[in-house]
Image: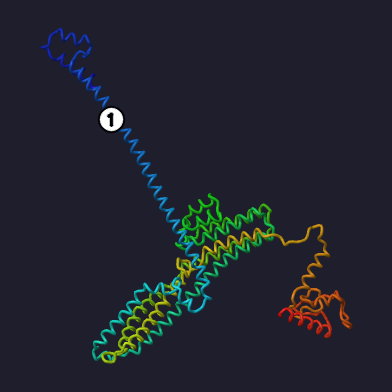
C-alpha cells in the first residue's frame, strides 16, 4: 500500500533536484515513475508484504481466539444453568420428601387421641413439650426464681417483707382470660378452614356423581373432574409457601395423578402459581368451559349443565374462603398484647414466689421445690396456651398439628375417579327380566328386612320386617278393607285403617322378631 506513494514522492524529488544528472532524470521520467529498481522502494515493498502477512495471521489468530472464547462462554453458561437446574431439582426432591414425611407423621398423630393416659404423656413429637424446650421466657422465669431463692438464703432486705404480693393473682386472672379467648378464636378458625377444605372435596365428589349418574360422555366427564382436581391442588400452592409448585404440584401433577397436560402446566407456570390464587381460578375457568362446550355440543342437557356449573362455582367459593382467611389472620395487635403480658407477668410471678417461699432461717428445701414447681406449672400453662393458639391459627403450615393437605388431594382424586368408574347396579340378564319378577324381588327384600315399627309396617305391602308375610294373606276378619287400599301419606299421617286386633297381632310378631334379632 505504501509503495506507490513512496514512488510518487521520489519522482517529485528527482524533478526538483536539478543537480542530478540528465540521464537519471530522463530515466525516471521515461520509466513513468517505476522505481522497481530503487532499493528503498523494494525494501518498503518487502516490509509491506511482511506486515500484511503478519496482520492477516494476527487477524486469523484473533478470530480463532474469539471463537474459542465464545465456545468456552457457552459451555460455562450451560454448566452454570445445569448446576442451577440441578440445585433446584435437588431442592424440589428434598421438599417433596419432607412433605411426605410430614404427612405420615400427621396421619399417625391423629390416631393418638384415643390412646391410654400414660402412653399419651410419653409422646414428644406433636406435643407442646417440643416447643417449650426452646422457649426463652420459660427458662428466664425459672432462672429468676432460682436467683431469688439463693438470695433469700443469704438474707433479703427488711422492706421486702412489706411488699404487697397479692395483686399478682389479679394480673394472672386477666392474662388467663385473654389467653383462653385467643385459643378459642384460633380453634374456631382451625376447624372453619378444615370445613372449607372438606367442602372443596365434597363439591368434586358431587360433580363426579352427577356426571356418572346422568350419563355425561366419558371423555368430557374425565376432563371436567381432572380440571376440578387440578384447581383443588393448585389452590394450596398459592396459599402457603409450604406447598411450592416445584416441590409439590409438579409431583402431584405429572408423577402421580396426571392432572394436567404439558401445555396446560406451561400455562400455569406462566401465571406463576406461587404468587397467589390465579392458577386455581384458571383451572376453574377451564372446568366451566368444559361444561359449556358439552352443553353446546348437546352432550348434556341444560339442567345437568346448570347443576355442574353450580358445583364448579361452589368449589371456587370454598377455595376462595381459604385465601380470605389467610388475608386476615388473628390480629397482630392482640397477639402482641398477649406476648407483652406474658413477658411482664411470668418473671414477676417467679420473683414473688421466690420471696414468699421464706428467707434466712425460714428457708427449707421442700418449700423451695414446691414453690419452684408452682412457678414451672404456671409458666407451662401461660406459654403453652400461647403456643397452642399460634400453631392452630394457621392450619396450612409445616407443623405436625396442621391439616393433611396432601392426603386431602390424594383422597379426593382417587375417590372421584372411583365414582366415575362405578358400575350400574347388577341385575339379571335382559332376557330374564320381567316386570313381575323385578317387583317380586323388591318385595322379597322388603320382607327380609328388620322392622322399623308397627305403625309403619302394618297393613301395607311397602312395610318393613317379617310382619309383611302375614299381611300378604289378606285382611283380618271384619276389617272391611281391600288389600289394594292405598296409604294416605299427606302430612305424614297413616290412614291404612286396620282394626285393633290385626295391629296387636302384628305388633306381637314384630316384638318377637326384634327379640330374636337382639339375641
The residue drawn where x is 75% and y is 74% is 449
Between 325 and 450, the residue placed more toward the observer is 450
Residue 341: where, in percent of width, then height? 36, 79
Compared to 430, does 354 lie above or below?
A: below
Q: Mark 1 points at which residue?
A: 58
The residue drawn where x is 27% and y is 24% is 53
Q: Quadrant of the C terminus?
A: bottom right
The residue drawn where x is 52% and y is 62% is 406
How is this picture coloured? rainbow
Q: Quadrant of residue 504?
A: bottom right
Residue 140: where, in percent of width, then height? 32, 77
Q: Quadrant of residue 407?
A: bottom right
Q: In which quarter of the image is residue 165?
A: bottom left
Between 519 and 508, the residue placed more toward the observer is 519
Kindly give the residue lying farthest to the left in the view shown: 19
**Secondary element type, mark 1:** helix
The residue drawn where x is 37% and y is 83% is 373
Report crowding for label 1: few under 14, some 14 to 19, many 20 or more residues within 10 A (C-alpha): few
Compared to 232, does 362 lie above or below?
A: below
Compared to 23, does 190 lie above or below?
A: below
Residue 329: where, in percent of width, then height? 45, 70
Q: In which quarter of the image is the N terminus?
A: top left
Residue 138: where, in percent of width, then height? 35, 77
Amino acid at each position: 500500500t505504501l509503495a506507490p506513494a513512496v514512488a510518487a514522492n521520489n519522482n517529485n524529488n528527482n524533478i526538483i533536484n536539478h543537480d542530478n544528472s540528465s540521464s537519471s532524470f530522463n530515466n525516471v521520467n521515461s520509466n513513468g515513475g517505476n522505481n522497481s529498481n530503487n532499493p528503498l522502494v523494494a525494501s518498503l515493498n518487502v516490509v509491506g508484504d511482511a506486515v500484511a502477512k503478519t496482520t492477516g495471521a494476527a487477524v486469523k489468530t484473533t478470530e480463532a481466539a474469539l471463537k474459542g472464547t465464545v465456545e468456552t462462554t457457552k459451555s460455562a453458561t450451560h454448566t452454570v444453568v445445569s448446576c442451577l437446574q440441578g440445585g433446584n431439582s435437588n431442592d424440589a426432591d428434598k421438599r417433596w420428601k419432607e412433605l411426605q414425611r410430614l404427612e405420615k407423621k400427621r396421619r399417625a398423630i391423629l390416631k393418638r387421641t384415643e390412646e391410654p393416659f400414660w402412653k399419651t404423656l410419653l409422646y414428644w413429637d406433636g406435643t407442646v413439650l417440643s416447643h417449650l424446650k426452646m422457649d426463652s421466657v420459660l427458662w428466664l422465669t425459672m432462672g429468676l426464681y432460682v436467683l431469688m431463692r439463693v438470695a433469700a438464703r443469704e438474707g433479703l432486705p427488711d422492706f421486702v417483707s412489706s411488699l404487697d404480693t397479692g395483686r399478682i393473682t389479679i394480673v394472672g386472672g386477666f392474662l388467663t382470660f385473654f389467653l383462653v379467648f385467643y385459643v378459642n378464636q384460633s380453634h374456631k378458625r382451625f376447624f372453619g378452614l378444615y370445613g372449607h377444605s372438606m367442602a372443596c372435596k365434597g363439591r368434586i365428589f358431587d360433580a363426579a356423581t352427577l356426571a356418572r349418574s346422568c350419563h355425561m360422555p366419558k371423555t368430557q366427564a374425565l376432563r371436567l373432574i381432572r380440571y376440578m382436581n387440578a384447581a383443588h391442588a393448585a389452590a394450596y400452592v398459592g396459599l402457603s409457601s409450604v406447598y411450592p409448585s416445584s416441590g409439590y404440584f409438579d409431583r402431584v401433577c405429572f408423577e402421580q395423578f396426571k392432572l394436567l397436560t404439558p401445555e396446560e402446566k406451561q400455562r400455569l407456570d406462566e401465571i406463576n402459581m406461587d404468587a397467589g390464587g390465579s392458577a386455581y381460578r384458571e383451572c376453574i375457568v377451564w372446568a366451566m368451559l368444559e361444561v359449556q362446550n358439552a352443553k353446546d355440543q348437546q352432550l348434556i342437557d341444560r339442567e345437568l349443565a346448570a347443576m355442574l356449573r353450580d358445583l364448579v362455582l361452589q368449589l371456587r367459593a370454598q377455595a376462595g374462603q381459604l385465601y380470605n382467611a389467610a388475608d386476615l389472620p388473628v390480629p397482630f395487635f392482640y397477639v402482641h398484647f398477649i406476648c407483652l403480658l406474658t413477658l411482664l407477668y411470668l418473671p414477676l410471678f417467679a420473683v414473688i414466689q421466690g420471696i414468699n417461699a421464706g428467707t434466712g432461717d425460714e428457708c427449707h428445701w421442700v418449700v423451695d421445690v414446691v414453690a419452684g414447681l408452682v412457678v414451672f406449672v404456671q409458666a407451662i400453662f401461660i406459654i403453652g396456651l400461647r403456643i397452642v393458639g399460634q400453631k392452630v391459627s394457621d392450619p396450612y403450615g409445616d407443623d405436625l398439628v396442621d391439616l393433611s393437605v396432601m392426603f386431602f388431594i390424594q383422597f379426593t382424586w382417587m375417590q372421584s375417579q372411583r365414582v366415575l368408574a362405578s358400575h350400574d347396579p347388577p341385575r339379571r340378564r335382559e332376557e330374564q327380566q320381567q316386570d313381575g319378577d323385578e317387583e317380586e324381588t323388591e318385595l322379597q327384600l322388603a320382607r327380609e328386612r328388620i322392622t322399623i315399627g308397627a305403625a309403619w309396617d302394618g297393613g301395607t305391602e311397602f312395610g318393613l320386617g317379617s310382619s309383611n308375610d302375614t299381611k300378604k294373606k289378606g285382611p283380618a276378619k271384619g276389617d272391611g278393607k281391600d288389600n289394594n287400599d292405598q296409604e294416605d301419606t299427606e302430612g305424614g299421617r297413616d290412614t291404612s285403617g286396620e282394626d285393633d286386633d290385626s295391629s296387636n297381632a302384628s305388633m306381637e310378631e314384630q316384638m318377637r322378631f326384634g327379640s330374636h334379632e337382639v339375641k
